[in-house]
Image: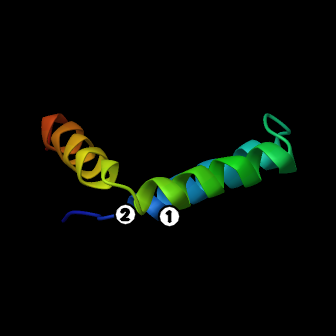
Amino acid sequence: MGLTISLVVLFGVALAVMLRFKVVGYGGAFVAMMFGFYLASTGAADTVNSLMNAVIAALPTQ
């Protein structure tokens, strides 16, 4: 049985944990979210998606 988690949810949880433990402040969290939002609308989005797919495919499966 496999469990699939969206990378958006995974990164959202990671950002929430960083805010909770004060690793990053609210300003840094806002910058990170806006960077991701604007990166998704550029030509680099396809490259980032391809890179993430390659990294996920390289992970060992059970």
Image quarter in which the C terminus is found: top left
Residue located 14% across and 43% down the image: 57
> Mark 2: which secondary structure?
loop
- In the depicted structure, whether residue 49 falls above or below residue 24: below
Which kind of residue does numbered mark 1 sit on?
Val
17 is higher (above) or lower (below) than 6 = above
Name the residue located 21 percent from the left edge and 63 percent from the top edge: 2
Task: Assign a secondary structure to mark 1.
Answer: helix
Residue designated by label 1: 9
Q: CA distance from mark 1 to mark 2?
A: 7 Å
The N terminus, quarter of image: bottom left
Q: Is residue 39 above or below residue 22?
A: below
Query: Residue at the spot x=46%, y=62% of the render?
Result: 8
Kindly indicate the quadrant of the structure image that contains residue 55.
top left
| Disc number placed over residue 28 in the picture, else none | none
The residue type indicated by label 2 comes to Ile
**x, y (%) of residue 38?**
52, 58
Please indicate whether residue 58 sits to the left or right of residue 20 in the image. Answer: left
Q: Is residue 18 toward the left or the right of residue 43 in the image?
A: right
Q: Position of residue 51 (x, y in %)?
A: 23, 40
The image shows residue 58 at horizontal and vertical percentages of 14, 35
Can you tell which mark lies on residue 5?
Answer: 2
Contact? badges 1 and 2 (CB < 8 Å): yes
| Residue depicted at 26% across the width and 52% down the height | 49
Out of 54 and 2, give the one closest to the viewer.
54
